[in-house]
Every structure is written in structure tokens, then in C-alpha cells.
Image (tube, rainbow, N blue to C red):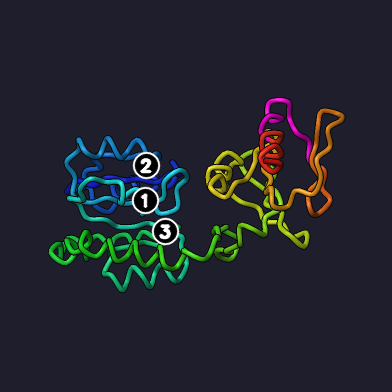
Amino acid sequence: MRVAILDDELHCVESLVLHLQSLFPEITVAYKATSPVEALEKLKEIDFDLLFLDIEMPVMNGFEFLNSMEEITFDVIFTTAYSQYAVKAFKAQAINYLLKPLDEEELRSALLTYMEDKEQSKRTPENLEELLSSFARENSSKDKIAIPVSDGIEFINVEDIVYCQSHSNYTTIHLQNNKKLMFSKTLKDTEVILNKYGYLRVHQSYLINPSHLKRYIRHDGGSVIMSDDTQIPISASKRKTITAYLDSLRT
């Protein structure tokens, strides 16, 4: 059997490869990638049976990736740290899934079940459309993002975010009421996630929610005051970004 792996976190890809080699040496990893955009083209050229697919990825999530495929001729096992709602949706549509962080015994069980009953697994393409529609309905009125925390996952409203601050490979998300969350993504990754909500990158270390913009200060290189009274500097390279946004409000 030939499998492919798509997950934006390299350590997750490599960990899964090691588990597969240990548990099922007869399985060939035909392709592995961290970029869904790259995988869209490459997977057209590769013969494989099963795709291990991460859901939460920047630029294009797992569902968007499958929607972008011209034809689905393979089976899918989703790898996810998603909500209980997602797990219920997978079960309802007989979709294979594994919760992250991956457990070796659960991986073994999932693959044995898949190999013993491939005909049932082949229902994946037929059930996929309803699964995607189900997620669309769930998220249509809820602009939320999932933030992994020490004891699980916290779902926060995008509108509650005041600004995001870079800390090396992590991002601190500053919320209303002075609450903070540490996000295990770089600010660049966070920007990709929040870009569709109109967030503005005003500095190498800061991404702001313009809905919480309170004041713009021109002198000393430029800065903004947010709704929580935090003053955030504007870098010279990002000055056009904020002025363009302010100009759009006056037209």
C-alpha cells in the first residue's frame, strides 16, 4: 500500500513516517509535504492509495484542499486537533480520522480497520461533500479560530482579538479584557490565518485588528493606539499599509 502525508508541521510529518515504518514496514510513503499548494500539483502525478491529511493549515485548510482537487481517487484519514463537533461530523459521515497528537495504538487500529474493510473506506469521496457542507454550516456565522492551550483547545472570536505580538516562533494573542493567549505559530502563520478578516501587519512584531484601532499618531515614525490603550509602533516599510487603510475610511 502506498500513502501520502500532508501536514503543515514538519515534525508531525516526520513523526507519522516513523510510526508507519515501525508499525507497517510494508507501507510505502509515496509522498510527503507541508505545503497544500505544492501538494495539489504533485499528487496528480503520484499513484497512492491513502492520504493522511491535516485539517488546520495556513493558506488552505484540509477541506479547502480536497475541494480544490479535480478528482479524488484515494481514501483519506484526517489528522486533527479539532472540536468535538468535528469528531461527530466525521463519525456521522463514516470518515476516517485520528486526533492529534497521534497515538501509535490508535494509528495501528485505524490502519488495520482501513485495510480490512477497504470497500467501506471507499465511501469517503461520496461522503465528503456532506462533511464539507456540514462544516460550512457550523462555521457560517462563527468567525472563530482554534488556539491550542495546555489542557485542550480554546475557540476565540476573531473580533475579540485586539492585536498579536511576535515572540520568536510563538505569537501572543492579546484579547479584550486584557486576556492573553500564547499561540504556537509564528506571526507570519498567524497573519495568514487572520488575513481574510482584514488584519493589518504594521510592524515586524505586530499584527493589529483595525476594528480595535483607537488612534493614529504621525510623529516619531508613526504609531497606533489600540482599544486597550497599547501603543504599537509602525515600521517604515508598513507605513503605507496603515495610511492606505486610513485613506479607505475617508472615501
The residue that mark 1 highlights is 64
Q: Residue 11 versus residue 72: which sits nearer the camera?
A: 72
Where is residue 75 shown, x and y percent of the image?
22, 55
Where is residue 145 shown, x and y percent of the image?
55, 58
Residue 166 visible in the shown view: no
Q: Residue 103 versus residue 48: which sits nearer the camera?
A: 48
Q: In which image quadrant can residue 176 be found?
A: bottom right
Going from the N terminus, do you reach mark 1 or mark 2 first?
2
SS category of the residue bearing label 3:
strand
Three-letter code, disc 1: Glu
Residue stretch rendered in magenta on the structure: 232-241
Residue name at image x 37 percent, y 51 percent: 64
Instruction: Give me the C-alpha separation between circle 3 and circle 2.
Output: 15 Å
Magenta stretch containing residue 242, yes or no?
A: no
Q: Residue 246 versus residue 23: which sits nearer the camera?
A: 246
The residue that mark 3 highlights is 80
Residue name at image x 47 percent, y 67 percent: 83
Residue name at image x 55 percent, y 60 percent: 143
SS category of the residue bearing label 2:
helix
Q: Residues within 10 Å of mark 2 (few under 14, many from 20)?
A: many
Where is residue 32 shown, x and y percent of the image?
32, 40
Magenta stretch containing residue 237, yes or no?
A: yes
The residue that mark 2 highlights is 36
- Residues marked 1 and 2 touching at CB (< 8 Å): yes
- Using the image, determine if residue 176 lies above or below residue 220: below
* The C terminus lies in quadrant: top right
Residue name at image x 73 percent, y 26 percent: 236
Instruction: Give me the C-alpha separation between circle 1 and circle 2.
Output: 9 Å
Instruction: Give me the C-alpha separation between circle 3 and circle 1.
Output: 15 Å
Residue projecting furthest to the right? 219
